[in-house]
């Protein structure tokens, strides 16, 4: 109990004491009192709770997903459901996870739109020259390049600093992606 005390706190709300039955003939233990707790409250430390910071980004992410599906369909790329899922997984891991820590919503939206259009433009130019075997893997690489390009061109020194501070406040270490 002492180990988890800083993380989880239990408080008894409704407790009763139950004494041993004195009238029982076969009663062996007479001095034992049982404490019965019917209700208790549990309070978790704030370190155990993770907030969903990506909730505000649902609309821009959906906009990017629709744009990707539309442009890839227009290019003549046949996408299976798994391909769409893999593209969006790569987008979330490579872009959205970084965008959460940007200082303003405007910069977050700029990053999402810039990264998706950058990757789609690269897909379009490469499909004219050669065949792409895995669109989702290709787009993951393009998302990484777009992040590097975006952070160098579009983020000021103050915004980069704010991004590092936001990441540090939430995770306790400085980010590798900056």
Image (spheres, rainbow, N blue to C red):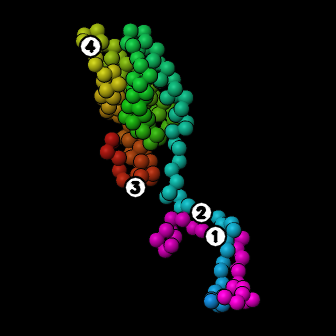
- Per the image, label 4 sits on a secondary structure element best described as loop
* x 75%, y 89%: residue: 23
Q: Which mark is residue 169?
A: none
* x 42%, y 48%: residue: 167
Q: CA distance from mark 2 to mark 4?
A: 56 Å
The residue that mark 4 highlights is 131
Mark 4 or 1, nearer chain start? 1
The residue that mark 1 highlights is 11
Q: Which mark is residue 172?
A: 3
Location of residue 89 in the rendering, given as x and y in whole percent from the top left corner: 41, 32
Location of residue 136 in the rendering, given as x and y in whole percent from the top left corner: 35, 25
- Per the image, label 2 sits on a secondary structure element best described as strand
Q: Which mark is residue 43?
A: 2
Q: CA distance from mark 4 to mark 1?
A: 63 Å
Q: Nearer the viewer, mark 3 or mark 2?
A: 2
Mark 2 or 4, nearer chain start? 2
Is 17 included in the stretch rendered in magenta?
yes
Circles 1 and 2 in contact, beta carbons < 8 Å: yes
Q: Residue 155: tell me if it is visible.
A: no
* x 64%, y 64%: residue: 41
Location of residue 66 in the rendering, given as x and y in whole percent from the top left corner: 49, 20
The magenta stretch is 1-26
Q: CA distance from mark 1 to mark 3?
A: 30 Å
Location of residue 139 in the rendering, given as x and y in whole percent from the top left corner: 34, 24
Residue at the front extreme of this rendering: 26
* x 67%, y 74%: residue: 36
């Amino acid at each position: 109990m002492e180990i988890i005390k800083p993380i989880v706190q239990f408080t008894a709300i409704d407790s009763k004491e139950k004494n041993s039955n004195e009238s029982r003939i076969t009663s062996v233990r007479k001095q034992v009192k049982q404490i019965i707790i019917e209700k208790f409250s549990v309070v978790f430390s704030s370190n155990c709770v993770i907030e969903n910071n990506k909730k505000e980004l649902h609309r821009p992410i959906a906009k990017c997903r629709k744009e990707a599906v539309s442009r890839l369909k227009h290019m003549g790329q046949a996408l299976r459901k798994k391909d769409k899922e893999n593209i969006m997984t790569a987008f979330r891991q490579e872009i959205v996870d970084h965008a959460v820590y940007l200082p303003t919503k405007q910069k977050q939206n700029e990053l999402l739109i810039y990264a998706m259009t950058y990757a789609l433009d690269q897909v379009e130019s490469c499909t004219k020259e050669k065949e792409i075997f895995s669109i989702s893997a290709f787009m993951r690489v393009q998302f990484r390049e777009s992040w590097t390009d975006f952070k160098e061109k579009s983020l000021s020194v103050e915004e980069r600093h704010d991004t590092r501070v936001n990441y540090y406040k939430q995770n306790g270490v400085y980010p590798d992606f900056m």
